[in-house]
Amino acid sequence: MFPLSRTCVKIAAACALIVLAASATLANEMIQKSGPVGPHEPILVTVGQKHVIAFFVPGNGQCNVQAVIWNADDPEPKSAARIRVSLNPRQTTSIDTSATETFTLKCGEFAESLSAIDTDRQVALR
């Protein structure tokens, strides 16, 4: 092994601080993943001021969906609400996140996938 110079230690410390600062900045931003996803894989979307995580478990030819919705500005998600619904293949369900905003989940063919759909634009949410 070779000894680390003081310059290498300083560079490593600076890199660690940059990574910590970047992760703290991004902690409030949720990655967006609208699907289609397979069983047990999460859909992660933001609809207006709400974050949504949804997944499904296949069973009896259906998508057994569970979703959790909470306020995006809630540091400790005390506003969280859970929703459970069973969808037949190609069936959709709409969930209101506010008085004016809704998102739709769609069970795929043969209950093999789940997608978040923006029904206003007929494209997947981003």
Image (cartoon, rainbow, N blue to C red):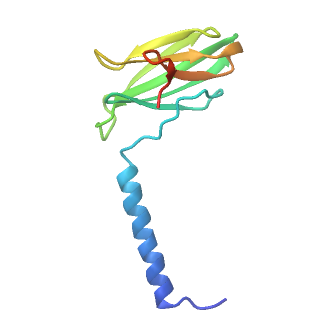
Q: Is residue 53 above or below residue 12?
A: above
Tell me if residue 82 comes above or below residue 2 in the rendering: above
Q: Quadrant of residue 13 in the image? A: bottom left
User: 120 or 26, which lies in front?
Assistant: 120
Residue 76: where, in percent of width, then height? 32, 39
Along the viewing direction, whichever of 124 and 31 lies nearer the viewer: 124
Image position of 61 with respect to 10: above or below: above
Q: Residue furthest front?
A: 121
**Residue at 40% across / 58% down in the picture?**
22
Q: Which residue is rendered at x = 52% and y = 34% of the image? A: 33
Give the mark count: 0
Q: Position of residue 12 (x, y in %)?
A: 48, 77
Give the left or right position of residue 104, taking residue 73 as reference: right
**71 lies left or right of 90:** left
Q: Quadrant of the N terminus?
A: bottom right
Q: What residue is shown at x 44% (from left), y 69% (from top)? A: 16
Compared to 91, does 48 lie above or below?
below
| Residue at (35% x, 53% y) in the render | 25
| Direction from residue 37 to residue 6 in the image, left or right | left
